[in-house]
Image (cartoon, rainbow, N blue to C red):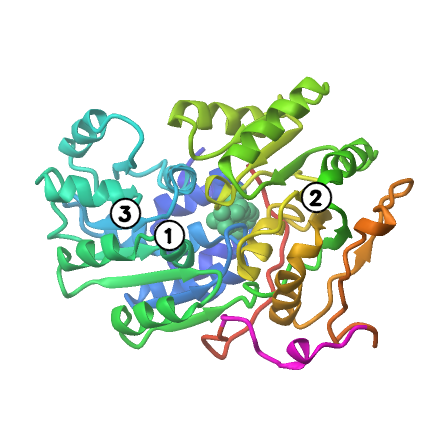
C-alpha cells in the first residue's frame, strides 16, 4: 500500500511525519483520544506538558508521536529521547506501542530495566538507538557505569510519575535529571498529583501545557464498583462466590502482599481455577509468562500485588477484586481502572473488614461520593463479624462522621484548568 492511500483520518490535523501517519493507521487508530488531541499539538511545538491521565487513556501515543516526529526531522543516532516508567511491564508496553507507531521509520529503540541481564541492553545501546525506554534504577545503573550517554537527550518523558514516587524512585530520577542537558522538552504524566509530584513538576516543567483528564480521583463511568463487607476469615469463600458468577469471565485479584498473592494463586489453582500470580518475588521471565498467559486467556484469574500490576493494560478484564484494600485511596482508582477499559463495562469489588474503616472513609472523601455497599447472594457476613462501616455524607444520611464531612481530603490537586472526559472507542491489546 502506498503512503498516499493511507490516512489516519483524525490524526492528519497534527502535521505528523508521513511515516508516523502510516504507523498510526497500522496500529488501527482512527481518531485521536482526548489526551492525544490535547497533548500532541503542544508536544509538537516543543512545549513542556503536564498530563494528568491514567494508563488506558491513550497517553503513550500522546507523548510518543510528538517525540518520534521530532526525531524524524533530524536523523542523528544515539539516545535523544528518554522515557522513564515505574515498572518493567509498563516500560515494555510503552516500547511496544512506540515500536508500532514508528514501524515505518528507521528509528531505533531500546528498553532497559532491572531483573534481567544488562548485557543485551548494553549491546542494544551500542547500536545507537534514539529512544531509550526504561525504569529509573537500571537507567541510573547504566549511566553510572558509563554505558549510557544522556548528554544529547532532547525529550524526557516521566510516565506514571506518582507511581515512581510511591516506589521510591525520586532520588534515582533526580540523579538522572542531573545528567541531562538543561535545554530539553519535558513531558510528565501522572494519574494523581501528590505534593511531591507537584513539587517535581514545578521544578522540572517550564510553563507547561496542562492537560487534565480528571481521572485520578474518579473511576471511569464504565466501572460498577462496590464494597463487600466481610470478615477476614471469610474472604476466600466470598471470592469463590464472586468468581463463580456468570459475568465473571476474567478477573484481576489484588492482595496486599507478595506472599498473599502467591498463596492465593496457588489455592485458586488447587480449587480448579485457571489462576496465576504476579508479584515482585517472581523472576522477570516468570512475570512475563504470567502476563502473557493472562493476556492470551490461558488464565482467567491474575492474582497480583499493586506494584507488579501497575500500568497493565489488558482488555476484557470483567472483574477487579480487591481481596485486600490498597494501601492508599489513590491506588484504588488505579486498581479498579484495570477493568472497564476501552468503554467496556467492568465490575470492581472491594472486600472490606472492620480494620479498613479509615481507608473507606479516606477513599470516599477522595472520590467525593460513597461507594455502594453490596452483598453476594447466598453469602452474608456472620453477624458477629459484620464490620461497622458508615457511609460518607454524600450518600445516605446514615453514619455521618466528622471526618467524612471534611471536604477535599484527597491528595490530588486539579493541576490545571482543562478537563476532558476520556472517550472514543479503541483497540486494546
Ligand atoms: P495507553 O493509555 O497509552 O496505555 O493506551 C491504552 C490503549 O489504547 C492501548 O492499547 C493503545 O494502543 C490504545 N489506543 C491509544 N490511542 C488510541 C486511539 N487513538 N485509537 C484507538 N486506540 C488507541
Question: Is the CB atom of the residue marked by disc 2 within 8 angstroms of ligand 1's nearest atom?
Answer: no
Classify mark 2: helix, strand or loop.
helix
Residue at the disc numbered 3: 136
Residue appearing at x 13%, y 52% in the figure: 152
Dot 1 alpha-carbon crowd within 10 angstroms: few under 14, some 14 to 19, many 20 or more: many
**Viewer-closest of 274 and 385:** 385
Question: Is the CB atom of the residue marked by disc 1 within 8 angstroms of ligand 1's nearest atom?
Answer: no
x%, y% of residue 302? 60, 32
In the rendered image of this protein, does residue 299 appear above or below residue 304? above
x%, y% of residue 101? 40, 42
Classify mark 3: helix, strand or loop.
helix
The C terminus, quarter of image: top right
The number of discs equals 3
Q: Quadrant of residue 297?
A: top right
Dot placed on the residue nearer the N-terminal end, 2 or 3? 3
On whether residue 405 falls in the magenta region, the answer is yes
Residue at the disc numbered 2: 232
Residue appearing at x 43%, y 27% in the figure: 282
User: Label 3, label 1: how many angstroms apart (C-alpha)?
Assistant: 22 Å
Contact? badges 3 and 1 (CB < 8 Å) = no
Residue appearing at x 51%, y 41% in the figure: 309
Contact? badges 2 and 3 (CB < 8 Å) = no
Dot 3 alpha-carbon crowd within 10 angstroms: few under 14, some 14 to 19, many 20 or more: many
User: Label 2, label 1: how many angstroms apart (C-alpha)?
Assistant: 47 Å
On whether residue 4 falls in the magenta region, the answer is no
**Viewer-closest of 259 and 120:** 259
In the rendered structure, which segment of residues is drawn in magenta?
A: 399-412
- Determine which of the numbered discs, if any, sits on residue 65 in the image: 1
Is most of the magenta stretch helix, strand or loop? loop
Amino acid at each position: 500500500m502506498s503512503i498516499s492511500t493511507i490516512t489516519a483520518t483524525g490524526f492528519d490535523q497534527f502535521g505528523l511525519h508521513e511515516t508516523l501517519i502510516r504507523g498510526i493507521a497500522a496500529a488501527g487508530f482512527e481518531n485521536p483520544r482526548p489526551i492525544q488531541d490535547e497533548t500532541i499539538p503542544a508536544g509538537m511545538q516543543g512545549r513542556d506538558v503536564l498530563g494528568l491521565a491514567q494508563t488506558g487513556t491513550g497517553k503513550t501515543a500522546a507523548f510518543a508521536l510528538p517525540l518520534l516526529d521530532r526525531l524524524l526531522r533530524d536523523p542523528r543516532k544515539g539516545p535523544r529521547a528518554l522515557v522513564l516508567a515505574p515498572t518493567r511491564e509498563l516500560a515494555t508496553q510503552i516500547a511496544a506501542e512506540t515500536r508500532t507507531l514508528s514501524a515505518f521509520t528507521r528509528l531505533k529503540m531500546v528498553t532497559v530495566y532491572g531483573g534481567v541481564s544488562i548485557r543485551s541492553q548494553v549491546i542494544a545501546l551500542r547500536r545507537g538507538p534514539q529512544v531509550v525506554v526504561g525504569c529509573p534504577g537500571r537507567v541510573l545503573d547504566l549511566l553510572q557505569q558509563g554505558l549510557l550517554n544522556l548528554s544529547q537527550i532532547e525529550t524526557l518523558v516521566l510516565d506514571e510519575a506518582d507511581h515512581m514516587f510511591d516506589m521510591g524512585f525520586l532520588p534515582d530520577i533526580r540523579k538522572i535529571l542531573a545528567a541531562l542537558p538543561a535545554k530539553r522538552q519535558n513531558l510528565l504524566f501522572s494519574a494523581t498529583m501528590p505534593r511531591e509530584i507537584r513539587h517535581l513538576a514545578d521544578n522540572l516543567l517550564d510553563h507547561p501545557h496542562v492537560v487534565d483528564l480528571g481521572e485520578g480521583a474518579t473511576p471511569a463511568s464504565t466501572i460498577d464498583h462496590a464494597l463487600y463487607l466481610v470478615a477476614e476469615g471469610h474472604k476466600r469463600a466470598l471470592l469463590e462466590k464472586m468468581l463463580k458468577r456468570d459475568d465473571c469471565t476474567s478477573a484481576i485479584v489484588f492482595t496486599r502482599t507478595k506472599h498473599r498473592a502467591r498463596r492465593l494463586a496457588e489455592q485458586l489453582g488447587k480449587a480448579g481455577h485457571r489462576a496465576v500470580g504476579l508479584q515482585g518475588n517472581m523472576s522477570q521471565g516468570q512475570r512475563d509468562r504470567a502476563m502473557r498467559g493472562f493476556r492470551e486467556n490461558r488464565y482467567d484469574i491474575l492474582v497480583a500485588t499493586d506494584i507488579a500490576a501497575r500500568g497493565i493494560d489488558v482488555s476484557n478484564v470483567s472483574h477487579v477484586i480487591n481481596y485486600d484494600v490498597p494501601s492508599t485511596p489513590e491506588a484504588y482508582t488505579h486498581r479498579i481502572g484495570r477493568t472497564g477499559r476501552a468503554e467496556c463495562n467492568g465490575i470492581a469489588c472491594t472486600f472490606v473488614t472492620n480494620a479498613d474503616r479509615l481507608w473507606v472513609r479516606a477513599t470516599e472523601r477522595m472520590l467525593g461520593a460513597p461507594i455502594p455497599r453490596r452483598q453476594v447472594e447466598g453469602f452474608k457476613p456472620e453477624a458477629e463479624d459484620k464490620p461497622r462501616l458508615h457511609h460518607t455524607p454524600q450518600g445516605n444520611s446514615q453514619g455521618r462522621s466528622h471526618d467524612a464531612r471534611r471536604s477535599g481530603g484527597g491528595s490530588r490537586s486539579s493541576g490545571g484548568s482543562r478537563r476532558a472526559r476520556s472517550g472514543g472507542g479503541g483497540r486494546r491489546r
